[in-house]
Image (cartoon, rainbow, N blue to C red):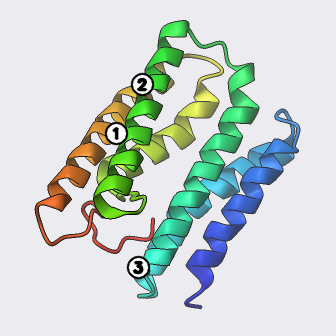
Amino acid sequence: MKYLPNILSSLRIVGAVALLLSNVSSIFFGVLYLVCGISDIADGWLARKLKCVTRTGALLDSVADICFVACCAWTLLPLLRLPQWLWLWAGVIVAIKVANQLVALVMYGRCCFPHTLANKATGFLLFIAVPMTFWSIAPITIVAAVATFAAIHESCVLARAEGSARRPEGRSQSSHS
């Protein structure tokens, strides 16, 4: 049972890759998208419930999140008609996130993916907003605003962690999800 959260995270990586091979308009794609999204919530909850939270599990969860978002972006973004300003905004968010990782590499000698409430909220909102974006850009614009805050907040968490004995893990020192 203690490996179940990591198994869920690993399956989310497999599911994300399967999304790349699926027809976006199929029921299979929709079910797989839903299962991957739910597994993102379930793995962390289970890790805390089973008292098997680990740094490896948190890293695996972050890698699974990145794979899921990247595979969804590769599959869905070509189908969405987003205005140029939204693409530029997304580029700024990505640039901040990449800069955060470069700073973490310099400061801590490793990448750090703080599991802050803002990052969790961004992931959840992105999961529910992407399907709605086929009808309106309002939901994805809200996600962009929250993601901008989360990226800047992550910068602050990483900078603040240097001056203290804490690890740059965000609100929860050993969170899995």
Instruction: Give the Cα distance between marks 1 and 2.
Output: 10 Å
Which residue shows up at 34% across the image and 39% down it? 151
Query: Are discs 1 and 3 less than 8 Å apart at CB?
Result: no
56 sits to left or right of 81: left
Instruction: Give the Cα distance between marks 3 and 2.
Output: 33 Å
Image mark for residue 92: 2
The mark that comes first in sequence, 1 or 2, is 2
Within 10 Å of the Cα at label 3, are there few (<14), some (14-19), or many (20+) other Cα atoms?
Answer: some
Q: Nearer the viewer, residue 155 or 40?
A: 155
Residue type at the position of mark 1: Ala
In the rendered image, residue 149, in percent from the top left (x then y), is placed at 29, 35
Question: Looking at the figure, which quarter contains the C terminus?
Answer: bottom left
The residue under label 1 is 151
Tag 1's secondary structure? helix
The residue under label 3 is 48
Within 10 Å of the Cα at label 1, are there few (<14), some (14-19), or many (20+) other Cα atoms?
Answer: many
Which residue shows up at 67% across the image and 69% down it? 10
Q: Nearer the viewer, residue 51 or 101?
A: 101
Above or below 123: residue 3: below
Tag 3's secondary structure? helix
- Of tags 3 and 2, which is closer to the observer? 2
Residue type at the position of mark 3: Arg
Residue type at the position of mark 2: Val
Above or below 28: residue 59: below
In the rendered image, residue 144, in percent from the top left (x then y), is placed at 42, 27
Query: Are discs 1 and 2 less than 8 Å apart at CB?
Result: no
In the rendered image, residue 142, in percent from the top left (x then y), is placed at 40, 26
Within 10 Å of the Cα at label 2, are there few (<14), some (14-19), or many (20+) other Cα atoms?
Answer: some
Tag 2's secondary structure? helix
Furthest residue in direction bottom, as rendered: 1
Which residue shows up at 28% across the image and 57% down it? 107
